Image (tube, rainbow, N blue to C red):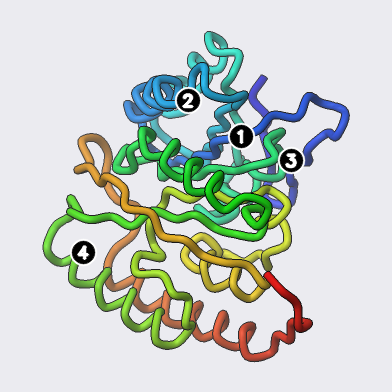
């Protein structure tokens, strides 16, 4: 059943429900045509390997995304849909999905289909290598051959360079949408509109470790980007300074990771 949330409402995990190993959380807005193929690819990547669920969070779409997700949910008992009445942004959509998740681990994907679900097992394999330290780590994709236009590639390189210098997040591709981390660790992070762009720095701030994993990147075949380069750059700089302030004001106890 689709859950409809207003701007001041949040889905909360019911601890009495069955706990799964993994919840795949996908925020979407006006991505008609993308949800069905993405869900099928997630099943192909994970079916038979672990217990998981797929959570799509619709962030106030105005196209056919809503009806597409409703059809998927009705036909797929591993898939759930949350919906914001009005758009609250990608970070809040991700927070909504994580709050409602039954998985002890969270994998995130962008809803545009450019992240490859076949890479989720790669992140899980890196998690397993880390052993008991894994719950305090973020496993994030590092896109090799980016399938974006030249302007976006240049903007991304500049943003990663500035972000890495200022925030010291030890992450060459901190904007990559495919990530894996423990649900408990995600819920420790401070919440704000641009959270999804700064997860590596915030995980380090929480005393965690960041591990980058090479992943595939695909061209967008449906829909259009929701972010303009200039808009993202201007807002991103303000957000980056805010995160820098959070890092400077943080004090961690001296402990072994």
The residue indicated by pointer 3 is 11
**Which one is in front in this view, the residue at disc 1 or the one at disc 4?**
1
Q: Quarter of the image for the N terminus: give it.
A: top right
The residue indicated by pointer 2 is 46
Q: Residue 177: give x, y in percent of width and height.
A: 41, 52
Dot 2: few (<14), some (14–19), or many (≥20) neighbours within 10 Å?
A: some
Question: In the visual, does 200 lie left or right of 83?
Answer: left
Locate residue 212: give its quadrant.
bottom left
Q: Nearer the viewer, residue 203 or 229?
A: 203
Question: In the visual, does 58 lie left or right of 17?
Answer: left
Dot 4: few (<14), some (14–19), or many (≥20) neighbours within 10 Å?
A: some
Q: Which mark sits nearer the N-terminus, 4 or 3? A: 3
Between marks 4 and 3, how big is the CA–CA gap?
A: 34 Å
Residue lying at 62% horizontally and 41% vertically, measured from the top left: 97
Q: Contact (CB < 8 A) between labels 1 and 2? A: yes
The residue indicated by pointer 4 is 152
Q: Which mark sits nearer the N-terminus, 1 or 2? A: 1
């Amino acid at each position: 059943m689709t859950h409809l949330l207003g701007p001041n409402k949040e889905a909360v995990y019911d601890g009495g429900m069955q706990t799964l190993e993994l919840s795949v959380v996908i925020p979407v807005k006006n991505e008609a045509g993308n949800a069905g193929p993405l869900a099928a690819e997630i099943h192909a990547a994970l079916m038979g390997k672990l217990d998981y669920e797929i959570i799509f969070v619709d962030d106030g779409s105005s196209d056919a995304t809503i009806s597409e997700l409703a059809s998927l949910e009705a036909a797929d008992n591993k898939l759930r849909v949350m919906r914001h009445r009005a758009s609250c942004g990608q970070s809040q959509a991700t927070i909504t999905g994580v709050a409602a998740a039954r998985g002890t681990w969270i994998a995130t994907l962008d809803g545009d289909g450019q992240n490859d679900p076949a890479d989720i097992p790669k992140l899980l394999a890196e998690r397993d290598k880390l052993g008991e330290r894994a719950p305090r780590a973020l496993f994030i994709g590092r896109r090799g051959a980016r399938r974006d236009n030249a302007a976006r590639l240049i903007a991304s390189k500049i943003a990663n360079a500035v972000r890495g210098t200022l925030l010291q997040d030890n992450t060459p591709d901190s904007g990559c949408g495919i990530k894996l981390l423990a649900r408990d660790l995600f819920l420790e992070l401070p919440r704000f509109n641009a959270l999804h762009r700064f997860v590596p720095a915030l995980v380090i701030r929480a005393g965690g470790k960041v591990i980058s994993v090479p992943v595939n990147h695909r061209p967008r075949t449906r829909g259009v980007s929701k972010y303009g380069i200039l808009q993202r750059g201007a807002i991103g700089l303000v957000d980056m300074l805010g995160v820098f302030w959070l890092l400077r004001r943080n004090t961690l106890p001296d402990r072994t990771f």
